[in-house]
Image (tube, rainbow, N blue to C red):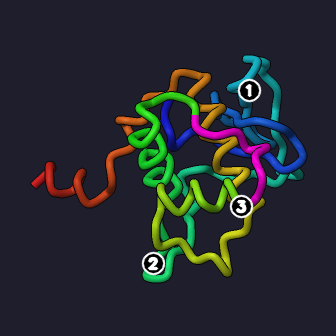
Amino acid sequence: MEFNKIIAVTGKPGLFEILSQTKTGVIVKSIVDGKRFPITATHNVSLLENIAIYTYEEEVPLGQVLKNIADKEGGKEGISHKESAAKLVAYFSEVLPNFDEERVYASNIKKVMQWYNTLVNANFDFNSLVPVEEVSQEEE
């Protein structure tokens, strides 16, 4: 499973892996239960690779945040997304210390934790989430 093929679909719970493209959209497979179905242009789709979290200095890619959580948890499940907002914010400040508390809401943190735990349960390899700078330095 590649991170650049994982999407979230508005109105549908869980995460999905893009399998192939069609004329009218894409065929996806649910990471949670393995069911396949088409997603058309009428659905709102977010590629996880394109999502970033605001910090006071810059925007940190979601992949890096997920990698930070995986490093903190040793690749095991993190706290539940159903925890209180205060617990989620405290936990997230350990993972991403300088996140912008005015622009990153508890609902955003809930979604990140839910996605992280979904990926853990799907045996996703978080070591594949190498920061972009490290990849470009290795190629030189």
Q: What amino acid type should be assigned to the residue bearing mark 2?
A: Glu
Predominant SS of the magenta segment: loop
Q: Residue at x 79, y 46 (%)?
A: 9
The residue wearing badge 1 is 30
Q: Nearer the viewer, residue 90 or 37?
A: 90
In the rendering, which numbered label is found on residue 58? 2
Q: What amino acid type should be assigned to the residue bearing mark 3?
A: Ala
> Could you tell which of marks 2 and 1 lies nearer the N-terminus?
1
Name the spot of residue 101 as percent of width and height, x first: 63, 76
> Callout 2 environment at 10 Å: few (<14), some (14 to 19), or many (20+)?
few
> Could you tell which of marks 1 and 3 lies nearer the N-terminus?
1
Q: Is residue 104 above or below residue 45?
A: below
Residue furthest to the top in view is 34
Q: Residue at x 63, y 40 (%)?
A: 79
In the rendering, which numbered label is found on residue 43? none
The residue wearing badge 3 is 86
Name the spot of residue 134 as percent of width and height, x first: 22, 54
Q: Is residue 85 above or below residue 122?
A: below
Residue furthest to the left in view is 140
Q: Quadrant location of residue 25?
A: top right
Name the spot of residue 121 as percent of width and height, x first: 61, 23
Q: What amino acid type should be assigned to the residue bearing mark 1?
A: Ser
Start-end of magenta stretch: 78-85
Q: Quadrant location of residue 89?
A: bottom right
Instruction: Reply yes or no: does residue 80 show up in magenta.
Output: yes
Name the spot of residue 10 as percent of width and height, x first: 84, 50
> Callout 1 environment at 10 Å: few (<14), some (14 to 19), or many (20+)?
some
Callout 3: SS: helix
Real-space CA distance between mark 2 and mark 1, rounded to the nearest whole angstrom: 32 Å
Instruction: Reply yes or no: does residue 126 show up in magenta.
Output: no
Q: Residue at x 79, y 18 (%)?
A: 35
